[in-house]
Image (cartoon, rainbow, N blue to C red):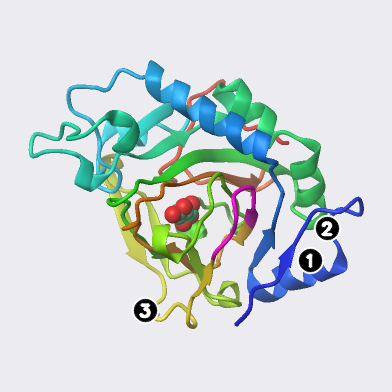
Amino acid sequence: MSVDRFTMTEEGVTQAMRAAYDRDGFLVVEGFASPEECGALSARIDSLIDAWEAPENPTVFGAHAADRYFLDSGDQIRFFFEADAVDEAGRPNRPVPTALNKIGHALHDLDPVFDGFFRSDRFRTLSQGLDLHDPRLLQSMVIFKQPGIGAPVGMHQDATFLRTDPPSVTGFWIALEDASLDNGCLLAVPGGHRGPLRKRFGRGEGDVLETRILAEDGGFGGKPVPLEVPAGTLIVLHGFLPHASGPNRSPRSRRAVTLHTIDGALPYPEDNWLQRRAGMKLRGF
Ligand SMILES: O=C(O)CCC(=O)C(=O)O
């Protein structure tokens, strides 16, 4: 299947873009971020890493059950390592900038460069064109796919991880570097957002993180297609869209930044893993 690709126009979200998003559950907008913006975000990521003092016991992303460093990162800027980039004692076995898997989860509220990028007219126009109701910026991340060791991300739906009642999460994924099959581009099941939510991840008894099965369906509704895109491309992801990404076994890095919004008018249950302390309110675009 060929993937429809768009660019932002004066008109904002066109009927064709809207139709593609409703049909596929994703929307590919090339040239959404300029090369200068991608460069500025990447430079900012480098300086955040430079300024970070890695703890004695760093956290590997994905190995975070009951881990306070992960659980309390909803209103922080925190750094998580790639599993293959730490030794048996959990310390990075290579320079930190090439060992990270993720930075998250409140860059959009705590860092002026990320704040300025995400809170721009373009995102506002886009979210209006997609009829997102009262979008509030809940979660932002830098997602690395380090050359040679970047791990795959399994097939999932974002509504598994961030829930309102009813579900309303929408993902915005922006490539800072070219993303192709060999360096771990996104993979998505076109139309898969019309299927049910399969799993729910959140806080259980004593804040232990747990995954509950809601619907048994290993197939995720179809065959995924690769979303190979040049740097600067935005991919909007419906909260129910099954998507994944491959490993990076290539010598080329693949960096992306992401933002997730929810409808601010809906209840946000306390068993969501991502919580903010009192006083740090969710804000819109
Ligand atoms: O960037 C990636 O490799 C995966 C991102 C993703 O699946 C997500 O943020 O939900």
Question: Magenta stretch?
Answer: 228-235
Labels 2 & 1 near each other (Cβ < 8 A): yes
Q: Which residue is mark 2?
A: 13
Would you name the residue on which mark 3 appears?
A: 218
Find residue 17 and name its label.
Answer: 1
Q: What residue is shown at x 53% (from left), y 47% (from top)?
A: 177
The residues bearing labels 2 and 1 have C-alpha atoms spaced at a distance of 6 Å
Which quadrant would the C terminus be assigned to in this image? Answer: top right
The amino acid type, in three-letter code, at marker 3 is: Gly
Q: Position of residue 244 (x, y in %)?
A: 44, 64
Q: Residue at x 30, y 17 (%)?
A: 53
Can residue 280 be seen from the camera position used here?
A: no
Q: Residue 240: x and y, percent?
A: 55, 66
Magenta span contains residue 230 = yes
* 266 versus 78 height, above or below: below
First of labels 3, 1 by sequence position: 1
Taking the image as shown, residue 54 lies to the left or right of residue 7, namely left
How many marks can you see? 3
For this orientation, the residue located farthest to the left is 88
Q: Amino acid at mark 1?
A: Met
Local crowd size for mark 3, using a 10 Å CA cut-off: few (<14), some (14–19), many (≥20): few
The image quadrant of residue 28 is: bottom right
Ligand 1 near label 3 (Cβ, under 8 Å)?
Answer: no
Say what secondary structure mark 2 lies in.
Answer: loop
Disc 3 element: loop
Looking at the image, residue 57 sits to the left or right of residue 79; the answer is left
The residues tagged by marks 3 and 2 sit, at their Cα atoms, a distance apart of 33 Å
